[in-house]
Amino acid sequence: MKLSPSLFKSTIVAALGGLLFGFDTAVISGTTHGLTDQYHLSPKFLGITVASALVGTLIGAALAAIPGDRYGRRDSLRVMAVLYFVSALGCAFAWNWPALVLFRFIGGLGIGGSSVLGPMYIAEIAPAAWRGRLVGFFQFNVVFGILLAYLSNYLLSLVGFGAEWRWELGVAAIPAFLFFLMLFGIPRSPRWLAEVGRVDEARAVLQLIGEENYEQRLREIVDSIAQAKALGKEVLFQKRYALPVFLAISIGAFNQLSGINAILYYLNDIFARAGFGKLSGNLQAVAIGATNLIFTMLAMSVIDKIGRKTLLLIGSVGTMLCLAGVSAVFATHRHEELLVWLLVGYIAFFAVSQGAVIWVYISEVFPNVVRAKGQSLGSSTHWAMNALISLVFPLLAARSGAYPFMFFCLMMVAQFFVVLFIYPETKGITLEDMQKRLEGSKLAAHL
């Protein structure tokens, strides 16, 4: 099946939510110094400022399915676009610190919601032959958004506007507004239309996106919805799902215990502690973002060949060594010129392993009947740990720049052994066979 223009357009538009997701999560890195000066923030309150968006993200991800099921994925994404827009303008014109925190929280709701609704919409319009690549485009856009955030911060630092942090936070209103408008030009999800009984509209959408056997595809959708309703509600937390639950929680936690988002959010502060100026720090951040993008693309091309477990083991060793090097730089205050290369290496190893594997792995280890709940559990663990680490990172770094990186390094050592002895390889195994293997494993019997 060829990729139809309508399907391509719908994927591009839905994936713009990923670009805004990445942009909003990373743009804060260029504003931490300005915010600290503007509002006289201690390390504790700087952590609260950064983490406020992540609290919103956690709530947005947990609740996104409610409007998504009631009003549809596409229309709910419009709400996320409005949240992005309001947050960007609110942060730009924040009249005091509580207002800034409130508008960052609102932006977090948009991030969390779009992180669930965007991939869900793409997966439901994509044919099986294209689903992996099209859903993967959302993750690509997240990383691309991070790079754009760093590039935007660098360019704005060259222009030299007053109250630079307001411009850096407010510029996201432009793509948010375009995202909102472009969502009017794509169809609703055919699966959601079928779920609410609008079968004729679902058929029309399948024809529009170029589904060759659209009648057969429509029957499959209707049958799968009927089967899901017949099964009723299955409880996630029971013995038979103990191992998948452990895998989802642990991979979500380790993803953040690697320190990835603490580094992305506080990147300019990290460079400043090593003696780099603001302009130089912004430029180094662009290099970090470009590395993230390149190695994410590499991971997407090899994940089905090398395997998930192998990539996680490679990433554990690589990030561990790089984090040990960063710790040594801050502990000894020597060889600061190596910091950029150590962080570039760290980002490369993370992007090609944890960054690429987490969402794929969580979706593979749960059986169909509890997959949505399992993905929500893994995602919630990821965002909760993200918020916690972002909150405490400035406090630890204020005591010693080496402490947090030592901790992250030890966590990667722990991850290596957990993955080596517990994680199953899911490459090339059907979801049904994976379910049988996990339920029949020795570890599952002990959990």
Image (spheres, grey):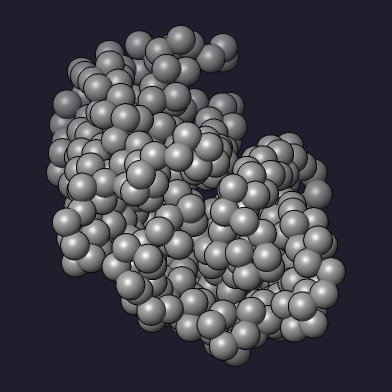
| Depth check, front residue: 296 or 267 | 267
Quadrant in the rendering for residue 329: bottom right
Which residue occupies 47% across, 34% down? 159
In-front residue for pair 256/61: 256
Name the residue located 79 percent from the left edge and 82 percent from the top edge: 332
**Does the rendering let one see residue 439?**
no
- State which quadrant residue 439 falls in: bottom right
- Nearest the camera: 335 or 200? 335
Q: Position of residue 191 (x, y in %)?
A: 31, 33
Number of marks present in the image shown: 0
Q: Is residue 398 visible?
A: yes
Q: Is residue 111 above or below residue 170?
A: below
Image coords of residue 376 (percent x, y): 38, 61
Find residue 97 and report its image quarter: bottom left
Image quadrant holding the C terminus, namely bottom right
Left or right: 27 as drawn, with respect to 139:
left
